[in-house]
Image (cartoon, rainbow, N blue to C red):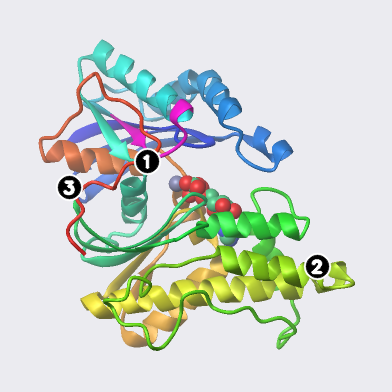
């Protein structure tokens, strides 16, 4: 059994967690997540402020996670070192290296998106490979075929805005606070049933696409955002139409994601779909996935909100996987704004 301390500081959450176990048989001993509310004032994450807030929070957050787990010795430290805001990542990476050095334990750098792939398995025993994965967050949108842990086929990604980014930008257009996803979802749910006053095109979804086409799995949401902008501009009483517009936007985005995920699951014959990232908090998305897949005998797994958004538990879990394969990082581990997910196999 290995006990791993995970640390996550890639964006605007300072998080630490202690996890112990081996293979897929793990248990989470503690998870502390401190969300940096300060960015709400600015309507988006301000990198310099994020780094400073991580610096202030990192010691108490890690101490608390260690305490809550019973203050037992740890065997390794796993830390997100890519992708993300470099200044923010560096706080976690520097801290993790120093702690690992002081405690004479290995440090392992973890790719943030690989962490998201493992998050759902912390709550659902069956959310393990092989599965089709859809990761939808504020910074990324990735469709992957996961043959085994550590073997990832990247099928599709966004050509422009990430799904969460599209939610956040549309929220801004509709005068809603940041981060906008939950607000857009709430507003969309207030739309009267059968209200079809707005309908936006489903981006990159056409019947004539074939798996060999580069846009078969890719998505693009910037055109959808422009369509929302045009709808807002051409509407006289925006206040009265906000719920209709939010609902039509969410319909188009969700239908696109469901369609692309269906293509991937069908192509690789997978019986499980695993969702991850902040947008997986969207209950309408999860319901639409279940409605599509369950009649086909395909199980859909979504993490709880706490594990869907950025957290250190998923980093500890991905770190454990690499440690068990005999991998570890050296003390010159660095932070990178972007980096391909490890374990990619040819698509
Ligand atoms: O994974 P995450 O916490 O951070 C990143 O790694 O980006 O995702 C944050 C994103 C934000 O864009 C937020 O608006 C979106 O997740 N989000 C949602 C919902 N809850 C959070 N989007 C749609 N519906 C939601 N209920
Ligand atoms: Zn994330």
- Residues tagged 2 and 3 counted as in contact (Cβ below 8 A): no
Tell me, for residue 233, which label it has, or none: 2
Tell me, for residue 338, which label it has, or none: 1
The answer to whether 13 appears left or right of 194 in the picture is left
Disc 1: CA contacts within 10 A as few (<14), some (14-19) or many (>=20): few
Q: Which segment did they paint magenta?
A: 78-87
Q: Earlier in the sequence, mark 1 or mark 2?
A: 2
Disc 2: CA contacts within 10 A as few (<14), some (14-19) or many (>=20): few
Residue 299 screen position, x and y as percent: 33, 74
The answer to whether 194 appears left or right of 140 in the picture is right
Label 1 or label 3, whichever lies nearer to me, is 1
The residue at the point 60 percent across, 26 percent down is 49
- Res 232 quadrant in image: bottom right
Secondary element at tag 1: loop
- Res 123 quadrant in image: bottom left
Count of numbered tags: 3
Residue position marked by numbered label 3 in the rendering: 23
- Res 44 quadrant in image: top right
Secondary element at tag 2: helix
């Amino acid at each position: 059994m290995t006990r791993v301390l995970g640390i996550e500081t890639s964006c605007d959450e300072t998080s630490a967690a202690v996890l112990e176990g081996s293979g897929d048989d793990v248990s989470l001993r503690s998870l502390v997540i401190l969300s940096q509310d300060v960015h709400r004032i600015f309507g988006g994450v301000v990198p310099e402020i994020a780094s400073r807030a991580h610096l202030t929070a990192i010691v108490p957050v890690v101490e608390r996670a260690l305490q809550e787990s019973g203050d037992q010795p740890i065997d390794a430290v796993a830390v997100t070192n890519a992708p993300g805001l470099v200044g923010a990542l560096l706080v976690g990476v520097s801290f993790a290296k120093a702690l690992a050095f002081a405690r004479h334990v290995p440090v392992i750098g973890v790719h943030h998106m690989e962490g998201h792939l493992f998050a759902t398995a912390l709550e659902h025993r069956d959310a393990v490979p092989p599965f089709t994965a859809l990761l939808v967050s504020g910074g990324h949108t990735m469709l992957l075929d996961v043959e085994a842990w550590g073997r990832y086929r990247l099928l599709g990604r966004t050509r422009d805005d990430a799904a969460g980014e599209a939610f956040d930008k549309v929220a801004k257009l509709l005068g809603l606070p940041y981060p906008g996803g939950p607000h857009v979802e709430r507003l969309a749910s207030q739309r009267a049933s059968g209200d079809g006053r707005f309908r936006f095109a489903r981006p990159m979804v056409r019947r004539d696409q074939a798996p060999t086409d580069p846009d078969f799995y890719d998505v693009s949401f910037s055109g959808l955002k422009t369509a929302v902008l045009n709808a807002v501009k051409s509407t006289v009483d925006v206040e009265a139409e906000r719920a209709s517009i939010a609902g039509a936007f969410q319909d188009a985005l969700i239908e696109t994601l469901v369609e692309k995920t269906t293509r991937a699951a069908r192509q690789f014959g997978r019986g499980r779909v695993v969702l991850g990232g902040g947008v997986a908090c969207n209950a309408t998305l999860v319901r639409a996935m279940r409605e599509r897949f369950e009649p086909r005998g395909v199980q859909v797994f979504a993490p709880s909100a706490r594990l869907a958004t950025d957290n250190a538990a998923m980093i500890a879990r991905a770190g454990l996987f690499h440690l068990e394969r005999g991998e570890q990082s050296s003390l010159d581990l660095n932070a990178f704004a972007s980096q391909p997910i490890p374990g990619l196999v040819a698509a």
